[in-house]
Image: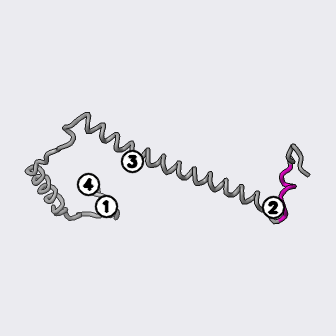
Amino acid sequence: MLTRHPSKNKRVILLAEYKEYERLHLISIAAAILIAIGVGVTLFFLYTNIYQSISKTREVLLTDPALNVETIDFNKYDKVMAAREKKINAETPAITRDPFVFVAKPNATSTKQ
């Protein structure tokens, strides 16, 4: 019977073979929400890590053009590397006593015992 006001209880209208339809509908809505959240998180990650880094780098380069080129003094570099090699290849002195072994020395006194 057709009425002017449809039934408020829509579960009664569903046939027996369509009773899982509501659950599948909710699962599809939940999947769509999860996909939307994943896309949002990905876009936020890209914006914060890539686009802001590019814009900050551009700002730094525009504010101080002297930061673009830095010359290297190879004479100083060679002197530093020679000093480093000298330090690395220096011989370590031999250990005269082992700090982890206790050796008891006899007491040296001037009085006889």
Q: Which residue is mark 1?
A: 99
Tell me if residue 91 is in the magenta stretch. Answer: no
Question: Position of 85 compared to 46: left or right?
Answer: left
Q: Which residues are magenta?
A: 9-16
Distance, label 1 to label 4, CA atoms, is 29 Å
Estimate the spatial distance between the alpha carbons at disc 2 and disc 1, rounded to whole Å.
83 Å
Question: Of all residues shown, which one is farthest toward the top?
Answer: 63
Q: Amino acid at mark 3?
A: Ile
Image quadrant assignment for residue 69: top left
Mark 3 surroundings: few (<14), some (14-19) or many (≥20) residues within 10 A = few
SS assignment at label 4: loop
Q: Residues within 10 Å of mark 1 (few under 14, many from 20)?
A: few
Looking at the rendered structure, the kind of residue marked 4 is Ser
The image shows residue 75 at horizontal and vertical percentages of 8, 50
Q: CA distance from mark 3 to mark 4?
A: 81 Å
* Disc 1, SS: loop
Going from the N terminus, do you reach mark 2 or mark 1 first?
2
Q: Is residue 53 left or right of residue 29?
A: left
Of mark 2 and mark 4, the one earlier in the sequence is: 2
Q: Position of residue 61 (x, y in %)?
A: 26, 39
Residue position marked by numbered label 3 in the rendering = 50
Q: Could you classify mark 4 by the number of other residues whose Cα lies within 10 Å: few (under 14), some (14-19), or many (20 or more)? A: few
In the foreground, 106 or 30 = 30
Given residues 4 and 51, the one toward you in this image is 4
Residue indicated by mark 4: 110
